[in-house]
Amino acid sequence: MKVALVTGAGKGMGAACARELAARGWGVGLLSPSGAAEKLAKELGGVGVTGSVVETADLQRLVDAAMAKWGRIDGVVTSTGHPPKGDLLSLDDAAWRTGLDLIILDVVKLARLVTPIMEKQGGGAWVNISTFAAFEPDLAFPISCALRAGLGAFAKLYADRYAKAGIRMNNLLPGFIDSLPVKEALLPKIPMGRYGKTAEIAKTAAFLLSEDAGYITGQNLRVDGGITRSV
């Protein structure tokens, strides 16, 4: 059995990823701050931890729980919500530091814990759920856009560093997804004319973790219904 860790697994895209992976026969180790991940883990036959991605000790508990149950970790899906929003220069230093903790350092911290395990196993794969706006910045989400662009750089650096160890890392860039309330005013901007489904994000994440994506690494895959304009 392959095993995946999923952060932000209590709801939305993270929970959908957990369900999709479990349906494909993966063991799942789940983390969320609300307790919902523990509940979902029981439903899926996995292990759950209530904690925060900004706390190394909580990430360690997740890794330890998965290793105690299965003795291996083959995949990781990182998923976090949006950091503070506001006018570009009105956001204070604390807001930017919160964004750094949620968007980049959570991946770095978990990578420090899991990479040695994957190296010993001979491989593994990562998917970081980011946003389409990482490379087409939107003033509505200044911290998210700026730091998720940085996450793109980190993923490429990690992918290059650990490719020879058989470890891949990619970012998945969703557009507007139905885990949030649909805003009718946004629909005309989306060529497909609808919000994406959490299940569509989950299936893409599962693909990127699978051997079918074995030659894909260091990439930023847009799953946005065509809303991104650049080519």
Image: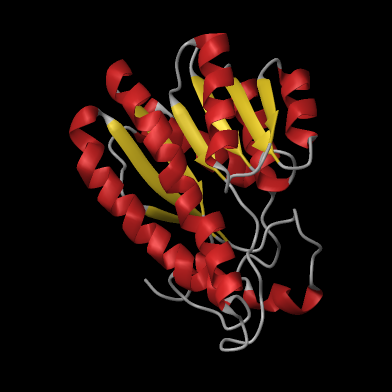
Q: Quadrant of residue 215?
A: top left
Q: Where in the figure is residue 44, as x and y percent of width and height?
A: 72, 20
Where is 97 relative to 42, above or below? below
* Quadrant containing the C terminus in the rendered view: bottom left
Task: Name the foreground residue: 173 vs 62.
Answer: 62
* Closer-to-camera residue (175/75): 75
* Residue 38 horizontal/vertical position (percent): 75, 28
Q: Residue at x 35, y 51 (%)?
A: 155
Percent x, y of residue 188: 69, 77
Instruction: From the viewer's side, name the closer residue of 107 and 177.
Output: 107
Say how many tags the image has: 0
Q: Residue at x 30, y 32 (%)?
A: 167
Quadrant location of residue 121?
top left
Residue 114 vs 133, above or below: the answer is above
Residue 11 position in % (x across, y down): 75, 43
Q: Is residue 86 left or right of residue 149?
A: right
What residue is shown at x 34% (from left), y 55% (from top)? 154
User: Relative to residue 193, is residue 157 drawn left or right?
Assistant: left
Residue projecting furthest to the left: 164
Answer yes or no: is residue 26 visible.
Answer: no
Q: Residue at x 37, y 26 (%)?
A: 211
Q: Is residue 86 above or below residue 204?
A: below
Does residue 161 appear in the picture of this structure?
yes
**Left or right of 91 on screen, residue 169:** left
